[in-house]
Image (spheres, rainbow, N blue to C red):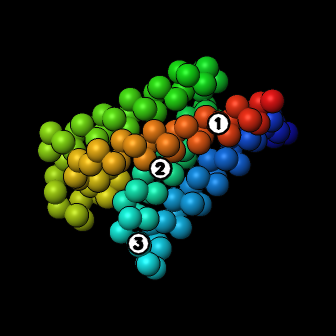
Amino acid sequence: MQRQPDNFRRFHLAAGSAFLAAGLFVLFYRGPGWRFTRGTLGDLFVVGFLYHLLSLFWRGSVTARASAIAVLAVGIELAQWARLFTTRPSDPLVIVTGSTFDVGDLLAYAIGLALAVMAERRWCR
């Protein structure tokens, strides 16, 4: 007999799926403003997805989960700044992490994480 997911996991599965769907849309979008959309909104949606994905497996406090994702996101951006990742666009690591440092990415990460946390707090009420 399969165990049904509880409401906490259902919420994070649904919210994470929404962030993932938005991120995939951004990845394949080629309309007007696609460079901004992919570069900025992609970063915004990816941290929201990662937050909800982590929340499926770890029931730590909201602050602890958000902090873990923030450390990961800032760490990746700092690794880009230090040029730790290769710059070949076809390299799988570059496709996942990106290769260029941008302060705007940090802002997008903060906004995406804030949206994910606000959605959870609103759901908990």
Mark 1 lies on residue: 118
Question: Is 84 on the left-hand or right-hand side of 71?
Answer: left
Element at label 3 = helix
Q: Position of residue 102 (x, y in %)?
A: 26, 48
Which quadrant of the view contains residue 94? bottom left
Please state which amino acid type lies under the numbered disc 3: Trp
Sequence-wise first label, 1 or 3: 3
Which quadrant of the view contains residue 39? bottom left
* 81 lies above or below 61: below
Q: CA distance from mark 1 to mark 3?
A: 27 Å
Question: Is 16 on the left-hand or right-hand side of 36?
Answer: right
Q: Position of residue 41 (x, y in %)?
A: 46, 57
Q: Residues within 10 Å of mark 2 (few under 14, many from 20)?
A: many
83 and 111: which is toward the camera? 111
Element at label 1 = helix
Q: Position of residue 74 (x, y in %)?
A: 33, 35
Element at label 2 = helix
Mark 2 lies on residue: 44
